[in-house]
């Protein structure tokens, strides 16, 4: 299937010739991959500003999972930590939470592997412990040791037991923010998955909601991140950036626009360094299996793609303006190649994660 050309801004390129001009450099690259030091990039499958629930599964020790949809993130490399919104009924007391990555279940790949073998690396973090009354914060939790991750994975958090009063009401305990499926604004024919899971008393994974709900719980990655989102008026307000389930199902009929957030902190400009570059690739076909290369894992078939060249800012980031959708019924994969022009004798190249979208 060929992708109809998106109407691109004049400073972007939509030709596969650009990629093939870059590809010869790959065989001569001698430098290590970028993004292997202290740098990490977040990726969160959630619509900021649209939390409509705070919850936990039980008042006892509570294990909660967010499974990453492979259409949102199929990646490579190591995980560096997590970003999560937590709310404490009594923020004056500190709490210990366990947060880690998890494998998909071998027979039910949309669900987490809840066994000990399913854990991919877990850290214990102290949260809250200052202030009074109820408190809500966005926490960035970094692991001391980076964790090698499979392309598809999930995250989990274990909450400590809550304290109850005589009426069995929680007087001190942590809750997670989420967006419920009932408030999503998806196209009629879009089919979301179950992404929110909890661990039952019988030590099994169970859906926390109908398909489509998401925890405000994301991951930090060593590899550069390319996050596709939509600019939309789906919620009846002014146009806003939606990075949750709506980003997988952009709507032509309501005038959504497709946009990209690109980030590689390793390409931040300091001193006399030149700004980094990124080549966004769009293709109708994925590579199965993926191809492991010296610049990361390639998930896109490079023989028939469109490309867009972007100059990163001083922070190693770029946000592309929204591009109009030419029509409904378009499915495409996207992955980005980040370029450090400061290394010699050849630029250092690193691939991002991949995403898959279908327009409606």
Image (cartoon, rainbow, N blue to C red):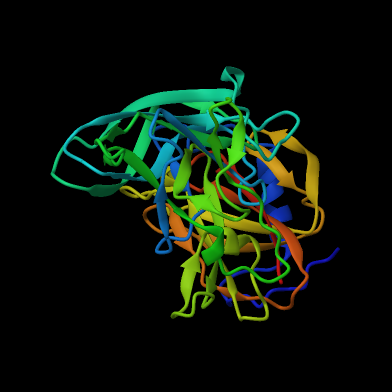
Q: Does residue 220 appear anywhere in the picture?
A: yes
Picture residue at 16% right of the left edge, 38% below the top: 92
State the image quarter where residue 293 is shown: top right
Question: Which quadrant holds the C terminus?
Answer: bottom right
Q: Residue at x 71, y 69 (%)?
A: 359
Q: Position of residue 45 (x, y in %)?
A: 52, 52
Horizontal and vertical percent for residue 344? 51, 39
Q: Is residue 275 rendered to the left or right of residue 114?
A: left
Near-viewer residue (343 or 145): 145
- Is residue 14 left or right of 133 when viewed as pictured? right
In the orientation shown, which residue stands out farthest toward the top?
116
Classify the position of the N terminus by image quarter. Answer: bottom right
x, y percent for residue 353: 61, 45
| Residue sitting at x 76%, y 30% | 107
Q: Which one is nearer the viewer's eye here, 128 or 326?
A: 128
Residue 155: % across, % down: 52, 36
Front-most of residues 144 and 243: 243
């Amino acid at each position: 299937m060929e992708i109809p050309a998106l109407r691109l801004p004049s400073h972007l390129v939509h030709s596969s010739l650009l990629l093939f001009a870059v590809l010869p450099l790959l065989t001569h690259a001698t430098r290590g991959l970028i993004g292997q030091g202290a740098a990490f990039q977040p990726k969160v499958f959630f619509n900021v500003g649209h939390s409509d629930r705070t919850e936990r599964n039980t008042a006892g020790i509570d294990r909660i999972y967010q499974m990453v949809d492979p259409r949102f993130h199929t990646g490579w490399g190591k995980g560096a930590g997590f970003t999560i919104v937590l709310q404490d009924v009594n923020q004056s007391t500190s709490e210990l939470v366990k947060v880690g990555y998890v494998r998909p279940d071998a027979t039910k790949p949309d669900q987490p592997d809840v066994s000990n073998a399913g854990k991919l690396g877990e850290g214990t973090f102290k949260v809250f412990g200052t202030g009074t009354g109820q408190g809500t914060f966005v926490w960035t939790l970094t692991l001391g040791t980076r964790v090698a991750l499979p392309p598809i994975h999930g995250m989990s958090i274990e909450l400590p037991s809550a304290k109850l009063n005589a009426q069995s009401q929680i007087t001190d305990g942590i809750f997670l923010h989420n967006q419920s499926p009932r408030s999503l604004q998806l196209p009629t024919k879009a089919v979301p998955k179950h992404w929110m899971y909890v661990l039952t008393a019988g030590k099994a994974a169970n859906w926390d909601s109908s398909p489509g709900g998401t925890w405000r719980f994301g991951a930090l990655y060593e590899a550069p991140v390319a996050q596709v989102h939509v600019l939309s008026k789906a919620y009846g307000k002014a146009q806003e950036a939606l990075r949750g389930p709506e980003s997988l199902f952009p709507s032509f009929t309501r005038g959504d626009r497709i946009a990209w957030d690109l980030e590689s902190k390793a390409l931040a400009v300091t001193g006399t360094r030149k700004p980094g570059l990124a080549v966004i690739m769009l293709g109708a076909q994925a590579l199965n299996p993926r191809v492991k290369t010296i610049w990361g894992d390639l998930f896109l078939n490079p023989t028939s793609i469109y490309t867009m060249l972007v100059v990163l800012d001083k922070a190693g980031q770029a946000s592309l303006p929204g591009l109009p959708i030419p029509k409904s019924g378009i499915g495409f994969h996207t992955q980005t190649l980040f370029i450090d022009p400061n290394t010699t004798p050849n630029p250092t190249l690193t691939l991002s994660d991949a995403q898959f979208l279908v327009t409606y």
